[in-house]
Amino acid sequence: MLPLVLILPIAACSGPTAWDGRGTSLGAGATRPGATGQDTSPEALYAAGMEELNAERYQRAVQLFDTVEREHPYSAFATNAKLMSAYGEYMRNRYTEALGALDRFIQLHPAHRDIAYAYYLRALCYYEQINDTERDQRTTEQAMAALQDVANRFPNTPYARDARLKMDLARDHLAGREMVVGRFYQNRRLYTAAIGRFRRVVDEYQTTNHVPEALHRLTEIYLALGLTDEARRTASVLGHNYPGSEWYQDSYALLVDGAEPAEQNRPGFIRRAVGWIF
């Protein structure tokens, strides 16, 4: 997935320009290398790096940007080269290297005109590593924290708006993980542990699409424990908030004699337990 911003084409101009909301200023201020390709000035090296980026030759681009920083550390292009090198590593899916470069850039250049982009790219490095819900979600939590940091620090930028959208997906992944673990405990009749997982989905991830199932699973568990009143209250909450949900239809079928579940091929826990016994 590409970053929100576009890297501007290389243009010959007198100096860097401020970010205008459509892209970074990082492509500005560089001149093209000489025809012989032997020009090793910071301008030429930086321009060559930008050309390699545009051609999607990211490894070579990173090498050129690193050369700018190494051989011309006090030039006007060295700072931008640090950030563009991190971008090249990101595009190569070398997220650890990109994060290391971005953390150094943020620490050394907190007032840089493209600092918002640096924070956003850092968040993307975590976001692109979000695993499926069957695996540990530590990276998802890191992505959430980094995206929230972007939204808090730069609330009126396109970066913040995109970060908020990505946070919704990250929350859905975290809720999905809780559901996976909750179902694992429920299937092994470890009801207290399962209730804790499903309650967390209901309480902490209310905007995700996992809440209806979490309420249904709680209804199943309360019935399995003989807590009929608690099961009815939970099903009532499910019906009030998600009246057309198939999960509510399943819960209703558990509590009302003669009511049919939403799908016979997706039975609830108690109906599965009956099948196991008989």
Image (cartoon, rainbow, N blue to C red):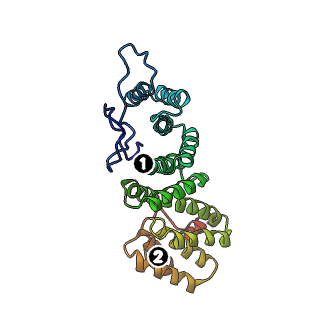
Residue 257 visible in the displayed image:
no
Q: Amino acid at mark 1?
A: Arg
Percent position of residue 41, x then y: 45, 23
Q: In the image, is residue 92 above or below residue 164? A: above
Q: In the image, is residue 260 above or below residue 72? A: below
Percent position of residue 210, x then y: 48, 65
Describe the element under mark 2 as helix, strand or loop. helix
Q: In the image, is residue 273 above or below residue 111? A: below
Please name whichever residue, 12 or 206, is drawn nearer the observer in this view of the structure.
12
Q: Which residue is mark 1?
A: 113
Image quadrant containing the C terminus: bottom right
Describe the element under mark 1 as helix, strand or loop. loop
Q: Residue at x 43, y 47 (%)?
A: 114
Q: Which residue is mark 2?
A: 253
Q: Is residue 31 left or right of residue 140?
A: left
Q: Amino acid at mark 2?
A: Ala
Please name whichever residue, 128 or 147, is drawn nearer the observer in this view of the structure.
147
The label shown at residue 181 is: none
Percent position of residue 72, x then y: 51, 29
In the rendered image, which quarter is residue 56 located in? top left
Specify few, some or many for label 1: CA neighbours under 10 Å numbering under 14, 14-19, or 20 or more: some
